[in-house]
Amino acid sequence: MSVTTQPYRDFSAEWHERMVRQRVAADATIEVTRRCPQHCVHCYNNLPAGDAEAARGELTREEHCRILDEMAEAGCLWLLYTGGEPLLRPDFLDIYTYAKKKGFLITLFTNGTLITPEIADHLAQWRPFSIEITIYGRTRETYERVTGVPGSYERFMRGVQLLVDRRLPLKLKTVVFSVNRHELADMQQFAKDLGAGFRFDAMLNPRVDCSRGPLAVRLQPREIVQLDLNDGARVSEWKRFATRFCGLPVTPEAGAQIYSCGGGVTGFAIDPEGKMSVCVISRFATYDLRRGSFQQGWDHLTREVRGTKITRVTKCTTCGIKSLCGMCPANAELESGDPEAPVDFLCRVAHLRARAMGIPVRAHGDCEYCGEVEAHGQQAVGF
Amino acid sequence: MAERPEMADRFRKKGEYVARVIAGETIVVPIRGQVGDLESIYNLNEVGSVIWELIDGQTPVSRMIDAVCLQFDITSEQAEEDTLNFLKGLEAAGVVEAA
């Protein structure tokens, strides 16, 4: 007999499989607050930092601790703290440290602008599994054009440096849209120079209240696919993903479930007011953790939400390139209010992506974009 | 019982850890301090879980072996071998040190 110490990657893959089999509530995302000192035009959920009504509605520190106790008891291991800006709450480090002591593997999403030497020291002492800071631009001009806050770029840079100085596990990420796309390569290089990981996403959602403000700055489908094509590793990953998850047809008669992701299987989200859902953008059949226990909430998600069946055949139900698409019930709800309605924008991106990468698209009903693929053949063209 | 000249008699944990039982497995998560490899997860089997609870800087190794022998119905020789291997593994990983 011996103790086994595993590299995290091996441990994570093995344990995730086990958690899925046993339906353990292993992956948590907690939005500590929706308030944020920045006013980013593309954000799906931010509220003003001084929004007193939002602050009054947020879970208290005691409520957070009670929920963390119950989550730990249920077997939750991975915990993502996000917002809004989590560090806006004066008691966030108390909540965070409580969670650390419970043995969660914590990832922290922050914009970095509120990090002080004291906060960085605390994080160095109670080390998170990962810290991910969003970079909105490589230059002050672009960064502050996105955030709308003068001086935010300097604060961001200071926050990054404080974490780097302490060798904390920092990663940078960005959302690419019309305002900052010209600085993507420079942002990537900045992360590389720091020795930090980097990733980007170009898919913007409507806001969680279904308003469509962020879509005004969303890139066009062709521009999004071009970003993929600029990155060989990204193309390889999409191809691997498309092969692995080729999307078997589903039908109402077969009792197919509306959700096919990890939400409600191992994953769940808790919003600032304690509403539990399958993910941060899903507002479908939430459970109020102020009125019941975490276990009751998890049972509700697995039974009521994950158990929801599709009601009709759409071009999505027989689509074989779902893995190239961001379509999900939560996204569809935000776009149209109908969790089963295809999202035109996502469909267009997926077909363009397939065409550009030479990924076969099988016929899947009345889909206007399949015609475009057929017209160009199944090979990469025109990019 | 055979003499263990190269082995300390008592061990303590370096830093702070939390042992968690999830899906029937015990894992040890480092929570504080620059000890061991904070990006690693320590996965314990049943015997390891029993010994882990006894690593407190006070309990002698001989008592750990007795506890393993008692709880798992194995010979004292096997219990000693398992216990010492386990402690050596933890020591090599930087998780415990001689008290």
Image (cartoon, coloured by chain):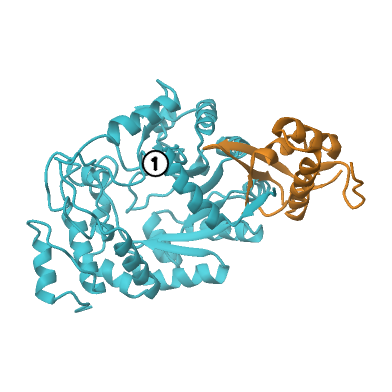
- Left or right, B26 with respect to A145, comes to right
Residue pictured at 26% horizontal, 63% vertical: A219
Picture quadrant where residue B99 is located: top right
Residue found at the far front of this picture: B75
Residue wearing tag 1: A48
Residue found at the far top of this picture: A291
Residue A250: percent from left, percent from top? 19, 48
Q: Quadrant of the C terminus of chain A?
A: bottom left
Task: State which chain is coloured orange.
Answer: B
Task: State which chain is coloured cyan.
Answer: A
Residue A83 appears in the figure = no
- Left or right, A54 with respect to A330, comes to right
Residue pictured at 23% horizontal, 74% vertical: A358
Residue A269: percent from left, percent from top? 40, 38
Which residue type carries mark 1?
A: Pro
Which chain is indicated by disc 1?
A: A
Residue B84, placed above or below residue A203? above
Residue A307: percent from left, percent from top? 27, 34
Q: Residues within 10 Å of mark 1 (few under 14, many from 20)?
A: some
Q: How many marks?
A: 1
Residue A69, placed above or below residue B28? above
Q: Nearer the viewer, residue B9 or A306?
A: B9
